[in-house]
Image: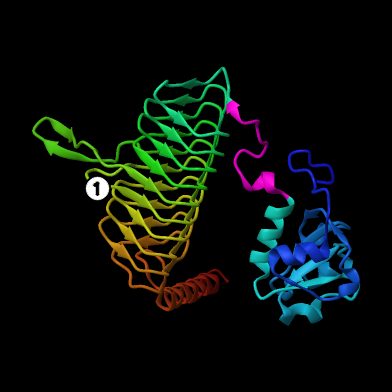
Amino acid sequence: MDKNHFFPPHDGVSLRELASVIGAELGDDSCADRIIRSVAPVARAKEGDVCYIVSRKHKADLQTCRAAAIICDPALRSVIPDHLPVLLTSRPAAAFALAGQFLHPVAARVPAVTAAAGVSPAAYVDPSARLEPDVTIEPMAVIGQDAEIGSGSYIGPGVVIGAGVKIGRNCSVAAGASIVAALIGNGVIIHNGVRVGQDGFGFAPGPRGMIKLVQVGRVIIQDNVEIGANTTIDRGAMDDTVIGEGTKIDNLVQIAHNVCIGRHCAIASGAGIAGSTKIGDGVQIGGASGINGHITIGDGVQIAAMSGVIASLPAGGRFGGIPARPMPDFMRDIAEIMVRSDERAKKRGDRNG
């Protein structure tokens, strides 16, 4: 990691300037001129690196840490050895994220290696498509009839943008993605292999088998959404599928037709959301969870990984298990299962002894 040519270190910024950028307070002004170039974990941070802690579990690593500075909550300052300068903030994880974006701006966008603005001669752009200034279109990309792409946006190799699709400004669409029947806001990041706007899963049983139900809706993706690799978002059947502003979606997530997801949600890898479900603002869904269709998840709900949600959930609750239930009930059930398992194991041991 000392010579990472994919994400080279920053030319250097003073600790004073970095503190201003991330909204932190310098613990000691005598270190204000130290130079910061990169981010690193506590265990291997060296001179020029900044790292962070949110608990005391890294206390042993701190003794040998050689970072140029540690970001931490004021309550943890006493844990930091005297040889390490501190940047104090009540939100160390968020401050570290801002530091990373500032020191490695290329890594904050897709693709990791920026290309010069302009349309590759190996791309196809329909004559009716409208591109604002400073759009980048990489080789083998296809831009369909009447598509619109805003200034500063990047379209990667092999991307397919369908007819009539509108993409806002400063968006990134990585290699191999396809987008049809969709309207996309500003600052959206779409990773490799994402599929947006394809048919939803809709069929009606008929006398000779399944009859396809047409899907005539759209996908609406609001500003500053990020969609992980190989995630699929189906267009609506007759209404729209909507992804709210600031929502972050991990890799390999399936979002079915007519799903409406609120603002600033987080959905971890492998989750599946069935059709016409409404998800409120600030909802967090753990990996490999399954969400039933035609239900409502209230604002601020947290759903544990590998949960099965079969009914609507009220706002603000924490739920887990299959079927998903309030977290205290789930944890009590798990504890009872473990106790009974231990009792059965003991009985088997007694019989065999």
Relative horizontal placement of residue 16, taking residue 173 as reference (left or right): right
Along the line of sight, the residue nearer the viewer: 338 or 57 = 57
Occupied quadrant, residue 265:
bottom left
Which segment is the magenta one? 104-118
Q: Is residue 311 left or right of residue 175?
A: left
Q: Residue at x 36, y 73 (%)?
A: 315
Q: Measuring from the top left, give residue 50's x and y in whole percent.
A: 79, 61
Q: Say what amino acid the circle numbered 1 marks.
A: Asp
- Which image quadrant: the C terminus? bottom right
Q: Residue at left 70%, top 74%? A: 89
Asked whether 106 falls inside the magenta stretch, the response is yes
Magenta stretch secondary structure, dominant: loop
Helix, strand, or loop for circle 1? loop
**Structural crowding at the residue carrying mark 1, measured as other residues with C-alpha within 10 Å and reported as few (<14), some (14–19) or many (≥20):** some
- The colour scheme applied to this rendered structure is rainbow
| Image position, residue 236 (x, y; %) | 28, 44
Q: Residue at x 40, y 74 (%)?
A: 317
| Left or right relative to 107: residue 311 | left
Q: At x 41% / y 61%, what residue is drawn?
A: 307
Q: Which residue is mark 1?
A: 239
